[in-house]
Amino acid sequence: MEPCEFPDIEQRLSPVLQRHGADASRLLQILRDVQDTLHFIPPEAVTCISSHLGIPRDSVEGVAGFYSFLSLQPAGEYRVLFSDNITDNMLGNRELMQYFCNKLWVEQGRVSEDNLVSVDTTSCTGMCDQGPAALVNGWALTNLDQNRLDLIAELIRSRKPVADWPPMLFEVVDNIRRKDTLLGDAFESGSAIRATLTRGTRETLAEVDKANLRGRGGAGFKTASKWTFCHAAVAEEEGSVICDIGGNPERFIVCNADEGEPGTFKDRVLLTSYADLVFEGMTIGARVVGASKGFLYLRGEYRYLLEPLEAVLKRRREAGLLGDNILGEAGFSFDIEIHLGAGAYICGEESALIESLEGKRGRPRNRPPFPVTHGYKGRPTVVDNVETFAAAAKIGLHGGEWFAAQGTPQSTGTKLLSISGDVSRPGIYEYPFGVTVEQILRDCGGDDAHAVQISGPSGTLVSWQEFGRRIAFEDLPTAGAFMVFHRKREMFAAAHNFTHFFAHESCGFCTPCRVGTELQKKIMDKIAGGHGTPADLEELKHLGGILGSMSHCGLGHSAANPVLDTLKKFPGTFERKLKALAFEPAFDLDGALETARKITGRDDEWAHL
């Protein structure tokens, strides 16, 4: 039997377990804390947590193994993860990571021999306007260059606690370049709630309906409809009604702040400087649907925002804007809890997010039923985007007509865009819906733009011939990402990067997505390696059809978008990399023997195939 490495595990984890109680829905938060304490989740911790929560060990291991920021294997005391979005690539993140590895004598993906440090990549960290970026033990590092990496290497060698590192390494700025009605007008905390209470609940819902507010997460479902369905929902548990309008009013409001789409960082800015606006929108939503509990699901990459957001919530409780009898209104009780993610893009999907909130793997549920009737713990739940709640607060204050006067008839209001890539002024831009891509490029300094990836890898690639198109649900819907590529960029590299992203982030639940994203990635690797043929392009199109039509959720449905868009709009970027052969095997066996030839010193005929 292997000796126990942590014989005192009960004692070491006692503060964590006491903090979270014996609530299995807190499992992800417990595992995050254990990871912070021990730098990984050892078998002894799995057993301890399993016993404490009364759930099987394999359930604990299953959750721990699902999230990228949790590790069942020993990681370095300092775990450095370089952001690997295409915009980070364009800023030289790969070269910097290799420089850093050489500096610390560590190989990418491995732990140093003294267990001091491990270095690897992670998906986009939401810092595209100030990259190259990375995370160290979950804390965001920005604007990396060789000088900063020299300093970081020295801090690690001296085993300086991350909490004591120079603050300038962790500086994150808002970079707001253009404000409109959402960001530009001053907002007084509590003003929207007061207006809602004065106007009345039904009347406020009517104003949200009149505003034609649509979800800012990209899908564009009408917010008033979602709130109405949730308010009217009746959920059943074991045959008995647990929730109806006149009985037990248990419903939930969830703010989806798992901003994982590469190239998006607008929610980061809203939560940094406009958190009151977001929480106020959640409170109005709670008043309308009759919820008394809300969650902010904060993506793990924004760990540094947890304490500031908790401080905002504390201030709002003290001001009577959260808690019991809000603003003196008898029976109006609502409070918000922050739930921290752990690096899983799929948790941006609302049902996967709810699974994660319940302490499970973040896997999308079969739908119907939808969360508005069967959401968190089976209760009616509204899940809305950060920007959606911020807009709802403004509607609660100013009314629906004011909001609907902006934008287009089908896309009212304004939209926040996270602009990065080949522009001279990256950052956050707020525009009324209907603005053209061309206008945006002029404003942000995208003078030599050749293409723009709208709404991240799952969105739409727009070529220079389409810059007259408009940001709107009826033309180019977007969750907010706006990545610009100038004419010297090789668009194949962007599509290649995105295929790796989707293969990594597939939750593995359904075969078309699990296998299809991996095959897509391997074919793109083959083409990138100079072994692609025209047959591979046909196979990519075939795979795209399977992914789009047979996958379980939106991740699989959109995973082939960047490849298919690039093939359609920039076919030359693929063709320049192809061999003229009709077929080329993906694996070069003779090439694989090259290492053996070097080791043995042989290069004769018999050493080749």
Image (tube, rainbow, N blue to C red):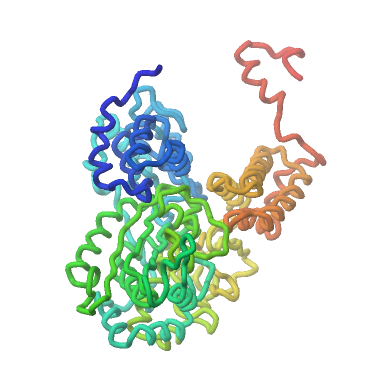
Q: Residue at x 43, y 48 (%)?
A: 343
Q: As rendered, which of 255 and 608 lies closer to the eye?
A: 255
Residue 399 or residue 170, whichever sits in front: 399
Residue 185, position in %: x, y?
31, 78
**Camera-side residue: 221 or 452?**
221
Tell me the quarter of the image containing the N terminus. Answer: top left
> Which residue is at a point 34% across and 38% down the rendered structure image?
49
- Residue 72 appears in the figure: yes
Relative side of 59 to 47, left or right: right
Residue at 71%, 35% (x, y): give it. 586
Q: Is residue 387 above or below residue 33?
A: below
Left or right: 211, with 199 as reference point: right
Q: Is residue 384 visible?
A: no
Quadrant location of the C terminus in the rendered image = top right
Q: How far across and down, in percent of the image, does residue 302 sit?
A: 35, 53
Q: Quadrant of residue 174?
A: bottom left
Give the percent coordinates (x, y) of residue 164: 21, 41
**For residue 461, side relative to residue 447 (left or right):** right
